[in-house]
Amino acid sequence: MNWRNLVGGWRLPPKLCFIVIFVGGCLADSDARDLGQWKSNDPRLSQWFRGLMQPDTIPPVSCCGEADAYWADQIRVGPNGEIIATITDDRDDGPLKRMHEDIGSKYIVPPNKITKKGGNPTGHAIIFLGTSSIFGLRSDPRPVLCYVMSGEV
């Protein structure tokens, strides 16, 4: 056998194997997290969070939950027409079991991550941020999983 890996009868170059493993590892860290934050919530709100799906994935993938959600009530349009959301969430991270995000942190929201389905009973615009990391270290900026405008629809 030479330098190529034999996988199911296919020979893959080492660089391609590394890329597949790296991308798979990054995606594995961005799964939805239910760490017990649902038990004290209004059941309607919990159901809404659980029902949100990323608008650009087939099959549907969850936007995640409150452990990945931050109020982002300040938005502006950037010079290239992109939406820039600013974190405005002053809630304690501990009860929500989420990573800390500083108030004022800004994220460019890709158009394919804006969800318009399901309304929004929270009264806040919400940005869902992934927990992608490389070798256990947090990546900055964190990936935007979903963005939901404020207000009931």
Image (cartoon, rainbow, N blue to C red):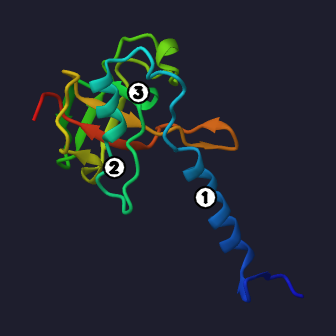
Q: Looking at the image, which is closer to me, 144 or 81?
A: 144
Whether residue 13 sits left or right of residue 37 in the image: it is right
Q: CA distance from mark 3 to mark 2?
A: 15 Å
Place of residue 6 in the rendered image (x, y in percent of width and height, measured from the top left): 78, 83
The residue carrying mark 2 is: 54
Q: Looking at the image, which is closer to me, 106 or 57?
A: 57
The residue carrying mark 1 is: 24
Place of residue 101 in the rendered image (x, y in percent of width and height, measured from the top left): 45, 23
Instruction: Please identify, in this view, whether the residue under mark 2 or under mark 1 is nearer the observer.
Output: 2
Q: Which mark is residue 66?
A: 3
Amino acid type, mark 3: Glu
Q: Looking at the image, which is closer to me, 132 or 104?
A: 132
Place of residue 17 in the rendered image (x, y in percent of width and height, measured from the top left): 70, 71
Query: Secondary structure under badge 2?
Result: loop
Q: On screen, 18 above or below 150? A: below
Dot 3 or dot 2, earlier in sequence: 2
Q: Quadrant of residue 68?
A: top left
Q: Residue at image x 38%, y 11%?
A: 91
Q: Looking at the image, which is closer to me, 4 or 30?
A: 30
Dot 2 or dot 1, earlier in sequence: 1
Dot 3 or dot 1, earlier in sequence: 1
Q: Residue at image x 24%, y 36%?
A: 148
Q: Is residue 71 visible?
A: no
Q: Residue at image x 33%, y 42%?
A: 146
